[in-house]
Amino acid sequence: MPAKPMAMVLCAMIALMPLACRKAAEKTTEKIVKEGKEAVGGISEGIEKGRKSSAGQDGAIIISTDAELAQNAKVTVFALRQGEGDKEAVVEMAVENQKDVPLRLTDLHKTGGCALIDKDGFSSPLNERATDPEMTVLPKAKQKVVLHFKASVSTAATVLFYGKKYPIETPASGPTSKP
């Protein structure tokens, strides 16, 4: 091959090199992110299965789904009130433990675990800083589970609690009292 066409091929190869490197980096990064997400998902599922397979010191039943909650407790919306500021709604759920062992409510902060749905069907997440991530209901007792949402009380219609919808039928009361 004459020198001039060979130089042109070499120049074309050098010009395309960054594109090939970019594609290789993109594929590598894509695989790393995919594998990482699967590993994190596996760790999370392993923790949940491990917690459920062995009783804690108090023998509590771990609740992280609506089916588990329905088998062990009755749930109602107890109260709705204004939180601190215009954009915080506080909902109190009454959870009645029907078992002879404690119930440990977990994973409320998981996506879909708990949300406030307004009259137009829009959902608002839990205010994670103000809501306990885990709560224990004593055997054969009722517990108020206090949930703080980033939402307006005036439009609150339904609470999504472990994937099940509970209508809010109680009128909103005044502002939250501070301790």
Image (cartoon, rainbow, N blue to C red):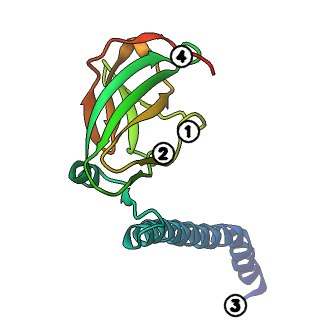
**Amino acid tagged 1:** Glu
Could you give the CA–CA distance between mark 1 and mark 2, rounded to whole angstroms?
7 Å
Q: Residues within 10 Å of mark 2 (few under 14, many from 20)?
A: some
Question: Is tag 3's residue or tag 4's residue first in the polypeptide sequence?
Answer: 3
Mark 3 in CB contact with mark 2 (< 8 angstroms): no
Question: Is tag 4's residue or tag 1's residue first in the polypeptide sequence?
Answer: 1
| Residue at mark 4 | 176
Secondary element at image label 3? loop
| Residue at mark 3 | 1
Residue 128 tag number? 1
**Amino acid tagged 3:** Met
Could you give the CA–CA distance between mark 3 and mark 2, rounded to whole angstroms?
67 Å
Q: Residue at x 27, y 32 (%)?
A: 76
Q: Residues within 10 Å of mark 3 (few under 14, many from 20)?
A: few
| Residue at mark 2 | 109
Pinpoint residue 92: horizontal percent, then vertical percent: 40, 28
The label nearer to you, 4 versus 2, is 4
Mark 1 in CB contact with mark 2 (< 8 angstroms): yes
Residue in front for this viewpoint, 89 or 175 = 175
Could you give the CA–CA distance between mark 3 and mark 4, rounded to whole angstroms?
85 Å
Could you give the CA–CA distance between mark 4 and mark 1, rounded to whole angstroms?
17 Å
